Every structure is written in structure tokens, then in C-alpha cells.
Image (cartoon, helix red, strand yellow):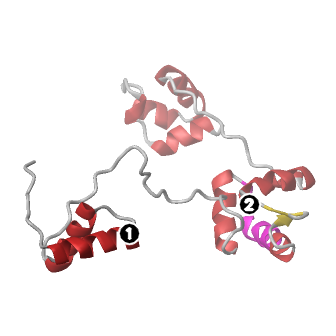
Amino acid sequence: MKRLEVRISEHVDARLEQMKLMFGMERQQILLAAFAQYMPDIQPAPKRKTSTQKDKEKPNLGSGTHAKNVEEVIAYFRHRGVPEPVEPKAQLFFEHYQSIGWKSGRNTFKHWGLRLKNWTTKHPDWEPKPKTEKKPIKMSAFLKWAKEFRPPVYEKYRQTESISEVDEYYIDEYTNR
């Protein structure tokens, strides 16, 4: 980048020195700031993202010092797998912690959702159901079941080679047997 040399009158030079002392800025910074004031139609180049700039993420359910409302607690309980009916449980939870100011002693909660774990020890029926992984269904096992318990289904799918071609209704029935 070429440097632009400008001859400055003694009056302007004295003024720049005064501003330098007043604002603690270098002369070049003062000149650039003044130039920017007189050229408002020039837009600054957009800042490039650096590794230090973080995108603002949407806060997770259960994070923060307190729940905003009962609906947030209901959404969190459903997300965590608290058994139905969720609404009265969420209402009880929300009202309790709202009454004590979302604190434990003198300390404000950092993640209010972690309090659910405490409540599941006091209320075992609130314990979230464990998430079970579905095992892949083998077509031969499904056909064996269908032949014994659902002969019409067996006849319909006995020539099928892939379980993906079987109706979801029958797969759910087979897995829930």
C-alpha cells in the first residue's frame, strides 16, 4: 500500500498534536477518523470471522439460572423423557423453585435443569425412562413371528427380501410383542 504524503500547515500540525495528547491517539488514526467523518457514503469492509469470534448459539433447554415459564419446564421434561402426565409435574417443579428464587441456599443455579435429577430421587415415578436402542430386525425372524401369529401378514410378505418393504404397523406390532 502506498503512503500518501501530505504537507500540513503549521496550524493543522499544532491542532493534530493537541488532539494526539487529548485523545491518546496517533496522528494517522486522528486523520483517518476525520476522513471517515467527511466520507459517510463509504462503507467499512465487513469484519472477517476469526477463531475468537463465536457464533451466538441458541441456549439449550435447562440451561440458565432459572426457567422463564412453565412451558419451558414442560418442554425440558418431555425432552428428558419424564413419564406422562408431564404438566402437573412441571407445574409443581416450577412453583417450588420459583418460590425459593431459583437458589440453593445463597447460591443461584447455573443450570436449573440439573435440579430434575434431585427430584427424581425424591419422586421415583419421575425417573426418565431409559432410552432403548432398537436392534435391527431380521426378515427371517419377522416372518417366523408372522407365520405363527399373523398368517395373513406372513402370506403378504413371505416373498419380500427386505424389512424396509414391510408396513411400519406390522413392524411396531412385532417389536412390541
Q: In the image, what residue occupies the spot 20% across and 78% down? A: 37
> In this view, which residue lies farthest toward the top?
140
In front here: 109 or 18?
18
Residue 58 falls left or right of residue 26: right
Residue 22 falls left or right of residue 68: left
Q: Which residue is mark 2?
A: 112
- Write the start and end of the magenta stretch as one range: 82-94
Asked where in the image residue 98 lies, by quadrant, the reply is bottom right
Residue 43: give x, y in percent of width and height.
17, 69
Q: In the image, what residue occupies the spot 8% across and 65% down? A: 7
Residue 81: give x, y in percent of width and height.
69, 52
In front here: 174 or 10?
10
- Magenta stretch secondary structure, dominant: helix
Q: Amino acid at mark 2?
A: Trp
Q: In the image, what residue occupies the spot 91% across and 63% down? A: 105
Asked where in the image residue 175 lies, by quadrant, the reply is top right
Give the alpha-carbon distance from disc 1 to disc 2, as whole Å: 51 Å
* On-image quarter of the C terminus: top right
**Label 1: how many residues lie within 10 Å, few (<14), some (14-19) or many (20+)?**
few
Residue 71 falls left or right of residue 27: right
